[in-house]
Image (cartoon, rainbow, N blue to C red):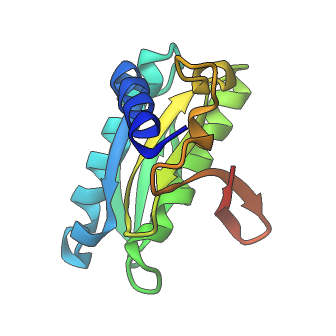
Amino acid sequence: MDEIEAHTLFVQWSEAHYKRGVFFDADFAPDDEANDWVEALVVGAVAAMTNAGTCLTFAGTKVWGGKVYAVLNGDEVMIRDVESAAADEAIPELFGHLDQIAAAQGQPERWNIFYDGDPAGMAYFVAPAELVASAELDVRDLDVGATWFRVTKTPDGYTLSPK
């Protein structure tokens, strides 16, 4: 498949799944606006999950001790450590916790992150079958200039692992 076909398929797939996606840009996540940045990211992610039928509540964010917490399903979850971590390290933390919520509800969807390390990208909350583009190809295998990641739990938290 040539580059134009790959990009065309990816655009078609992403347009069909835009309600299940959330854009993130850690370049525009200054420390003094960390709370607002996390809140906007969580609101987008919750909307995508709700679109897929996942039930969850988001009761806002709070800052304590240089860390930003999101209140998800009544639990305070640390999303961003403003004092000792780069903004893009919040991406696996948030989507890892959200994947756990979906798994606990028996949902097949998980967060698949399209990311080139810029640190900007898209995260899509889709089931494995939904990753198939119209040409019966896994959209993650299209060579469109970025890598797909899934969140992996480690003893120290969450990290991004190539699909």
In the orientation shown, which residue stands out farthest toward the right?
A: 155
Residue 149 x/y as whole percent: 61, 52
Q: How many numbered tags mark residues here?
A: 0
Outermost residue on the top side: it is: 53
Q: In the rendered view, would you say 98 is above or below 63? A: above
Q: Nearer the viewer, residue 69 or 24?
A: 24
Nearer-the-camera pick, 160 or 31: 160
- Quadrant housing residue 116: bottom left
Outermost residue toward the front in this view: 2
Q: Where the N terminus falls, by quadrant? A: top right
**Quarter-wise, where is residue 81 in the image?**
bottom left
Residue 94 x, y percent position in the rendering: 51, 52
Q: Position of residue 78 (x, y in %)?
A: 51, 61
Can see residue 12?
Answer: yes
> Relative to residue 52, is residue 107 drawn left or right?
right
Could one spot residue 58 in this view of the protein?
Answer: no
